[in-house]
């Protein structure tokens, strides 16, 4: 099979109406209580809580987490005055389909990944915070 692992996808394909970041936090391995590491890069994983701006999105599809592998906690774009969320774009996104069998019946679900975050239409955010510092829900 030609496709193995994650499938590259454009940000606009996943979030055609845009996306808003709520916060970011380190992903911790449940068993070891240590930071979870990306299998490909060996870097710590961070979860960005995202609201899909698509007015048709409902339920679980409205709020998702996008995993970002980075040495330091990625810095979210600045807040926009008057908005409770931060408009965001993800760089080099990929999707990994999997079978979620935690409900009454199995369903296909998707794990979203990105290599970076930035303000919509802007350059990548180069400000970074060392791992463990400021990795709370509100970002760094």
Image (spheres, helix red, strand yellow):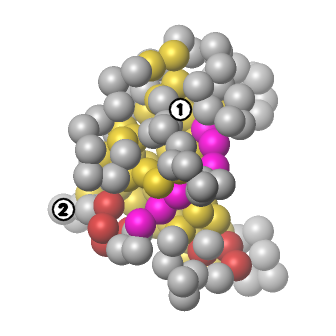
Q: Earlier in the sequence, mark 1 or mark 2?
A: 2
The x and y percentages for residue 73 are 52, 25
Query: Which mark identifies residue 55?
Result: none
Residue underneath mark 2: 2
Q: Position of residue 103 (x, y in %)?
A: 78, 75
Is residue 103 on the magenta stretch? no
Residue at the (18%, 62%) spot, across then down: 2
Q: Which residue is mark 1?
A: 45
Residue 125, how many percent across, how many down? 35, 31
Q: Nearer the viewer, residue 127 or 112?
A: 127
Residue positioned 40% across, 74% down in the render: 17
- Indicate whether 130 appears above or below 83: above
Would you call the spot at circle 1 few (<14 residues within 10 Å), some (14-19), or many (20 or more)? Answer: many
Question: Which label lies toward us, 1 or 2?
Answer: 1
Q: Secondary structure at mark 2?
A: loop
Q: Looking at the image, can residue 76 be seen? A: yes
How far apart are the alpha carbons under marks 1 and 2? 26 Å
**Where residue 21 sits in the image (x, y, percent)?**
56, 51
Q: Residue furthest bottom?
A: 56
User: Does the rendering let one see residue 7?
Assistant: no
Whether residue 21 appears in magenta in the rendering, the answer is yes
Span colored in magenta: 18-24
Name which quarter of the figure residue 140 lies in: top right
Nearest to the observer: residue 60 or residue 81: 81
Which residue corresponds to the image point at 26% horizontal and 62% vertical from the top-left? 10
Q: Quadrant of the N terminus?
A: bottom left
């Amino acid at each position: 099979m030609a496709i193995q692992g994650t499938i590259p996808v454009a940000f606009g394909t996943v979030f055609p109406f845009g996306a808003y970041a709520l916060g970011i936090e380190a992903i911790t391995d449940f068993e070891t209580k240590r930071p979870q590491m990306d299998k490909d890069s060996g870097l710590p994983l961070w979860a960005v809580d995202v609201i899909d701006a698509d007015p048709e999105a409902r339920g679980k599809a409205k709020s998702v987490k996008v995993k970002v592998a980075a040495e330091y906690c990625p810095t979210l774009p600045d807040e926009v005055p008057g908005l409770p969320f931060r408009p965001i774009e993800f760089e080099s996104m990929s999707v990994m389909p999997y079978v979620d069998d935690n409900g009454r019946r199995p369903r296909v679900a998707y794990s979203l990944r990105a290599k970076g975050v930035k303000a919509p239409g802007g350059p990548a955010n180069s400000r970074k915070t060392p791992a463990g510092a400021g990795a709370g829900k509100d970002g760094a």
